[in-house]
Amino acid sequence: MIGIGAICASPEGYEISVATNHFGHFLLSHLLLPMLSPWNGQVPRLITLGTVTANSEEFGGKVPIPAPADLGELQGLKAGFRWPIAMIDGKGFKPGKAYKDSKLCNMIMNREFHRRLHAPTGVVFNTLYPGCVAETGLFRYAPKLFRQIFPWFQKNITKGYVSQSLAGERVAQVVADPAFAQSGVHWSWGNRQREGATAFAQALSPRSSDIARASRLWNLSAAMVGIEAVVEPA
């Protein structure tokens, strides 16, 4: 959810964007892993939907409204991440940044899944950005004027807009197409959408690929969702 000014919390007391997009994804991924095994010659994959706003190497990740994604030194998580703490970096609450931070966590954790678990399990771990899907319930709590303007802006100014059907096709490709079988990749079709665009492996920002911070985020998140952290590779 994007756009609501008040802090909403999960039943556990965690800010809702991070609870849904990060803790929920992280726990579900762990629960799914034992069930992922080769089937009909296909290597299992665990794919996470990323976003351009979490990648500071892209223009969309540099937008300062309300602030770029930045987890700081995870001060909020270290302090327990319950009211009045609602940001991973421990700073004041900004709903748009909370969403961006949660998606940055998705991209960091998927790479950490790859680093820790691809070799022993064979599972392919990837993220993707299919383009800006601007007409979904994601913005249902945003002001009405924003909901009216944002799709037009993405279609005509940034050129980042994609339809739900095209985004779905791209997700399906990364999930099942043999061309996307390499693990540890962030797939993108670019920030500005062009007819006939093809996917490419996109470089991620240092914030997404810092192994030391990823390890700390993994361990803190594991403690918060109540699972045992997978031992790091030697």
Image (spheres, helix red, strand yellow):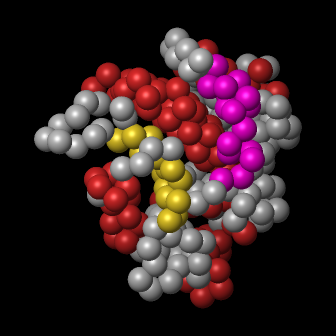
| Residue 224 seen from this side | no
User: Picture coordinates of residue 12 (x, y %)?
Assistant: 58, 22
Q: Residue at x 75, y 47 (%)?
A: 206
Q: Residue at x 72, y 61 (%)?
A: 57
| Residue 162 seen from this side | yes
User: Picture coordinates of residue 19 (x, y %)?
Assistant: 58, 33
- Does 206 lie within the magenta span? yes
Establish if 117 lies above or below 21.
Answer: above
Give the main secondary structure, helix, strand or loop, of the magenta stretch: helix
- Kindly indicate the quadrant of the structure image that contains residue 231: top right
Q: Residue at x 44, y 32 (%)?
A: 118
Q: Quadrant of the C terminus?
A: top right
User: Residue farthest to the right?
Assistant: 91
The residue nearer to you, when weighing 226 against 119, is: 119
- Does 89 lie within the magenta span? no
Tell me where the magenta segment starts and ends, as one range. 204-219
User: Residue farthest to the front?
Assistant: 234
